[in-house]
Image (spheres, grey):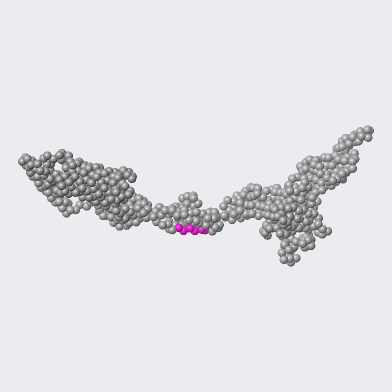
Amino acid sequence: MKNSTRNTISIVVRPLLVSALSVVVGLPLGGVPTVRAQTPPAPIVAMFDIENQGAPLDNDSMARLSNMMFGLLVAGGFKLTPQDQVRQRVIELKRDSYKDCFDQSCQIELGKAVAAAKSMSTRVTRVGESCQVATAVYDLRTEATDSGASAEGPCTEAGVSLAIRRVVAQLTGGRAGGEGTAGRIVGGVALDRGEAIVNEPTDRMGFLFVRTNPAGATVYVNGQEKGPSPQQLELPEGRYVVVAEMGRLYHPARQEVVLTTEGTRLVLDLVPAHGRVDITSKPSGAEVWLDGVKEGITPLRLDRKPSGTYRMRVQLEEYVAAEQDLVVADGQTVRIHRDLDPDWGTLLVESDPPGAAIVLDDEATGLVTPARFQRVRPGVHIVRLSLAGHGERADKAGVVRGQEARLSVQLDPMLGTLVVTSAYGDGTPCEGDLVIDGKGVGRTPWRGQVLAVEHSVSVACPGGRGTQRAQVRHNQRTESVVAVSGRAPVDEAAQAAARAAQAERERAARAEAERAAQARQRQAQAAAEGGTGAVSGAVTQGVTAPVPGERRVRVPVTLSVAEGFLRYGGDTRRTHVGMGLDVGLRFRGASWLVPGLGLWWTVESPVAVTLRPGIQWYFGKFPMYVRTALAAMVTPRRSVGFHAGLGGDIPLWKGGFLALEATTTVWSARVVPVEFRLGIGHAF
């Protein structure tokens, strides 16, 4: 019990006495010696390219895998001889190629030639469906293996890449970003943290003071974490391994000390495991990606980038992305500049005739041919051209990076027929010089083929001119009557002839009136004498004189057949045979005007039924007439037109007659049939 109490007091009092002595005497904590520790120098390793033993990978893939492994080892702390130096030594040794030097004796010889302490060889061997990656490290002094690692994965570039990361993780204790173990490395050698050290129990204590450069590193003593530096630890006498770590940006530092009651002051210098990276591009403003992570925009500076090999990609819209491996070494500055190649070509679009609107890849450009497009992405593009009177055409254009593609298109015209006539305001036709769209083409009347667009039509006749717009449609006929301002020139001779003709017509009319009066007088005399016969021959100007005893209203009924022809689309066609029943009303006091209604139908398919309400206008000595009527089709479709005819009634028996007539029905400007009617009728 006394010994236990004495030991406890000794443990408590001793640090106090030591502290007091350090203050009074001025010694650092009782004269505790200071030990400054740094990371031990790493051996130089000559790494050889990976040997392919049956893996389905080409030479480019193997080169990328070797470069990746080199970068991972550098990031893990290995000091590697530059690969170019190793290859140069191979040439000096007059080997056929670097890949021939895969045997151990050759690699040991080359390792010594480049002043390396160790050499590293790696093989990728196909075993069944998998590939094994095996790495061996040789000590060139003893010419024996020093360490090694292996891993398996799929026989693809990605699978072998993952296996290499596992191998590097085993060699570096996980520092290179693989699937490594819990250990750490110093210069490519796994750290011994002293976990296996077992000190003999004692009550003799000493102080261990640990400081790091930079401060804040995590301190481990015999594998046990003690916290961030600086640390002041009271430990029993014995052997201790002190390790300081500070993330990926610094290499860990290790120092083994023997602690006594006098204590130990330890300073650990952590060597930076990062470098500085300066990346520029032309043009600037490009995105910089390292191992799939966006780092920023050029110009870019990364002051504390962890050491290792990264896959760098510099990309900018409309430029070809640039890729390369970026190796960051401890404490070094890497400067990289990339000139980005344009990722576009130019496209020249032409047409005959020019002036066609351009649509590129379904987007209206607002430009017309000819036009040159800059910065067009490489590949196949769809170009659509449209021009009034020429329709639309689509073509493909292939654009190659850095070159100009040319697309020339011939546009076929779309034509229609234009007929131009001209007349003065009073309806008098005239002949004049014709100008269409500012170009003289002849004189009116004129007919020709023009583009199926809207045209400006101008006519200059004697004494005036006129202009109007004419819309011509494809494969159709368009008629344009240009109204000319002013009056027709006065022709004195023509006017005199017209006056003479008018006087003659008036004289003839007076004579005819006299004859009609005489006829009426004779009819009156016959009635006075008591005659009952009908006088049917007294006809003047188409008016039959009323006969005493005749009914006031008669109803002429006619049954007829008709057939004819029509012009449509430049062809002459026969009309369908039709039959009709016409019923009229003839009033005794106005026999020259006979209103009536006709019902007509075709006897050929398709059957068309038409109603024709109208008037027959009789004239002349012979019972001639002009028919004007409205034509209303009720089946097979409903349509309205104008019906006109010229004919006469030939007397056959009392009240009976034979009807002959030429008719036409205007349904539209394009359909005007001409028919001939033959009928038999009777006036009831």
Q: Identify which residue is drawn at 53% across, 54% down.
A: 376
Position above or below: 5 against 221: above
Q: Nearer the viewer, residue 531 or 389?
A: 531
| Quadrant housing residue 221 | top right
Tell me, yes or no, whether the highlighted magenta stretch contains residue 453.
no
Please state if 99 lies on the left or on the right of 674 as rendered. right
- Was residue 406 drawn as part of the magenta stretch in this picture? yes
Outermost residue, right direction? 2
- Which quarter of the image is occupied by the N terminus? top right
Q: Nearer the viewer, residue 512 or 217?
A: 512
Task: Give coordinates of residue 468: x percent, y percent.
Answer: 32, 49
Please provide percent x and percent y for residue 560.
23, 48
- Number of on-image labels: 0
At x 43%, y 58%, the residue is: 410
Q: Percent x, y for residue 542? A: 15, 46
The residue depicted at 54 percent of the width and 58 percent of the height is 403
Q: Which residues are magenta?
A: 404-409
